[in-house]
Amino acid sequence: MFRDDLLAGKRILVTGGGTGLGKSMGRRFVELGASLVICGRRTEVLEATAAEFRAVTGGTVTTHGLDIRDASAVETMIEAIWADGPLDALVNNAAGNFVARTEDLSPRAIDAVLGIVLHGSAYATLACGKRWLAAGHKATVLSIVTTYAWTGSGFVVPSAMAKAGVLAMTRSLAVEWGRRGVRLNAIAPGPFPTPGAWERLVPKPEFARACETSNPLGRPGEHIELANLASFLLADEAGYINGECVTIDGGEWLQGAGQFNFLRKMSDADWAAARPKKS
Ligand code: HXC
C-alpha cells in the first residue's frame, strides 16, 4: 500500500505503545522506516515489544516507563527524548476505560480515566508542541479517539468526556498551531478487538461477537487497517490534512444514527411483502 520508506527519517512517540492498538501502529511505523519511541507504565512489556520489533524489522526502538497521568514524568521523558534529537510525531494512544453504571463511579474512577486520556494527551501534546514551536520544527500529532466522542455513550461516560476533550484539543490546536508547522489529526476507531479493551469493555463473553460484528460490514477491524491509516496521516504526503478526525469503524456509528437503519433486519421476503401492489 505504501512505499517502504514512507516514514523514513521520522522519529515517532506512541504513548501506550507496548500493547494493543499502540503496538500495532508502532510496528507499522517501524516497518515503514520510522524510528520509534514507546512509553507506558510497564517497562517489561515495553521492553518485550521493543525487542520483538527490533528482531523483526531491524529498526530503532526505544522505551520509557512512566504514568502518563504524571505531568512532570511526561516532561522528564520528553526532555530525555529531545536530548537525542527532536520527535517528528506524537501519537496520543494511551487510554484507560471500563464499563460501569455511571452512578457507581467513585471520584477516583472518574479521575483515573480522565487522567490517562484527557490529561495525559494534553501533557504529551504540550511537552512536544512547545519544543516544536520554539524550534520551528515541522511536526504532527495524531490522537486516537472514538466515535462516542461526539455521539456520547452510556456506561463509558468518563471515557466519552475525555475523548471529546481530546478531539476538541485536536481541532483547537490544528488552528492555533497550523501556521507554525504543527498539524493535528485524530482517528476514531470502531471495534478493533484487543485483550486490554475487551477485558474491560465486554462484560459477558457472549457480547464480544455482537461488539465485533454488529456494524454494516459485519466484521471487526483488522489492526493493520488502523495502522495503515495512522501511517498515512503521519506521512508528509498527508500534509494538507489538519484538524480532521477520520472514522474507521465499518460504518458502525452511522448505523446507530440513521432513523430507519433498523430496517437492515428486513429479509428479501419482508421487502417484497412491503412493496405496494400494482393495481
Ligand atoms: C467501577 C472501577 C472499575 C469498574 C476500576 N474502577 N475499574 N469502578 N467499575 N470496572 C475504579 C477503582 O475502584 C478505583 O476507584 C479507580 O477506578 C481507579 O482504579 P485503579 O485500579 O486503582 O486505577 P489504575 O490502576 O490506575 O487503573 C486505571 C484503569 C485501568 C483505567 C481503572 O482499567 C487501566 O489501567 N486501564 C488501562 C488500559 C485500558 O483501559 N485499556 C482499554 C482502553 S480501550 P476507588 O474509588 O475504588 O479507589 C478504549 C477504547 C475506547 O479506550 C473505544 C471503544 C470503541
Image (spheres, rainbow, N blue to C red):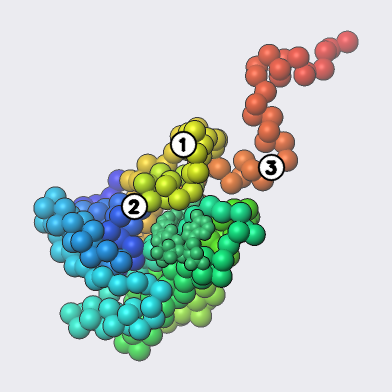
Q: CA distance from mark 3 to mark 1?
A: 28 Å
Q: Which residue is mark 2?
A: 20
Q: Position of residue 149 (x, y in %)?
A: 57, 59
| 191 shown above or below 42 | above
Task: Kindly identify the residue that appears in the image at 42 percent across and 47 percent down.
Answer: 199
Residue contact at pointers 3 and 1, CB within 8 angstroms = no
Q: Is mark 1 within 8 Å of ligand 1?
A: no
Circle 3 or circle 1, nearest the eye: 1
Q: Residue at x 68, y 14 (%)?
A: 269
Q: Which mark is residue 205?
A: 1
Q: What's under tag 3, amino acid-wise?
A: Gly
In primary-sequence order, the first of circles 2 and 1 is 2
Q: Residues within 10 Å of mark 2 (few under 14, many from 20)?
A: some
- Label 1 crowd (10 A; few <14 / some 14-19 / many >=20): few
Side of 106 relative to 1 (left or right): right
Q: Does the numbered disc 2 mark a residue whose Cβ is under 8 Å from ligand 1? A: yes
Position of residue 124 relative to residue 135, above or below, is above
Give amino acid for label 1.
Pro
Which residue has dot 3 on it?
258
**Residue 5: horizontal and vertical position, in percent?**
21, 57
Within 8 Å of ligand 1, the CB of disc 3?
A: no
Residue found farthest to the right: 279
- Badge 3: how crowded within 10 Å, few (<14), some, or many (20+)? few
| In the foreground, 100 or 151 | 100
Please report the residue visible at 64 percent of the width from the left and 29 percent of the height from the top. 264
2 and 1 marks in contact (CB < 8 Å): no
Residue 36 x, y percent position in the rendering? 23, 64
Instruction: Kindly indicate the quadrant of the structure image that contains residue 6.
Output: bottom left
